[in-house]
Amino acid sequence: MDSALVPPVTARSAVLSLLLGANPPTLSGREIIGAMDLFGITESTTRVALTRMVANGDLTRDRGVYTLSERLAQRQRYAQPPEQRDWTGTWEMAVVTATGRSAADRVALREEMRRQRVAELREGVWTRPANLRRRWPQALLDVSVCFESRPTSDPAALAAQLWDLPAWSARGNEYLALIAAVDDEPARFRTMVAAVHHLQTDPLLPAEFLPVDWPAAQLTSLYDDYRAWLAELRDSLAPVR
């Protein structure tokens, strides 16, 4: 398996991936250990990871039940893509106007904008087609002016300038092929984790901008099926009450 496409998954990442796929993000220690064993991670390694994650504030623990901290639960909300709406040709624009911001603040804003599927046209100028049904993050509103406009140039060319769509499509189709080819559960788990990370970088553009072989819908369907399988697995591992 191509390690560049499917890197190793640490015990911490595996636990987080399992909980991020749960609703609510709460599992018993028995459920987590059972799932991790299926994914090729030993009980002792899982217990060490759980202890460290509680100590680091990643998880809370109450009578043997583990729950994502609020900080990480927010990642679960980010994992759900915003709803799309009909595109009328306008673009969202955000122009950063605040000065004197620290390097850490600038990095944090860049990360937030990437999570919001917005691209940087030039330093401090962010944009994307206005086809998402969501609000600008408060962190951006605090430091910028936000509005909608229409580009004077070809919008498809602008989208191609901001996002490398052929590369994203090619990588996504490689994940589809890898998922179809895996024949053991640890490999399937690692591949799904990597594929979902890629899916979370989908720019969610209007359909008219996308290559014909755009794999996002197929990846989303496979992930939904995998989450349903994880839910069944979780139920089978849950203690009888």
Image (cartoon, helix red, strand yellow):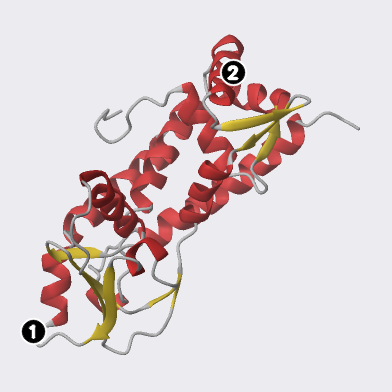
Specify the quadrant that holds the N terminus.
top left
Q: Position of residue 202 (x, y in %)?
A: 32, 59
**For residue 191, what is the image quadrant?**
top left
State yes or no: discs 2 and 1 in contact (Cβ < 8 Å). no
Nearer to us: label 2 or label 1 = 2
Which residue does the numbered mark 1 point to in the structure image? 153
Q: Secondary structure at mark 1?
A: loop
Rendered residue at 30%/56% (across/down): 114
- Examine the rendering and report whether any part of residue 227 can be seen: yes
Residue 145 drawn at (x, y percent)? 26, 76
Locate the C terminus and report the quarter of the image it occupies: top right
Q: Is residue 36 left or right of residue 138?
A: right
Residue at the spot of label 2? 51
Mark sitting earlier along the chain (2/1): 2
Whether residue 77 is situated above or below residue 232 in the rendered picture: below
73 or 227: nearer the viewer: 73
Name which residue lies at 64% across and 43% down.
25
Q: Residues within 10 Å of mark 1 (few under 14, many from 20)?
A: few
Q: Amino acid at mark 1?
A: Ser
> Farthest residue toward the left?
153
Q: Residue at x 42, y 58 (%)?
A: 218
| Residue 59 picture location, percent across and down | 59, 32
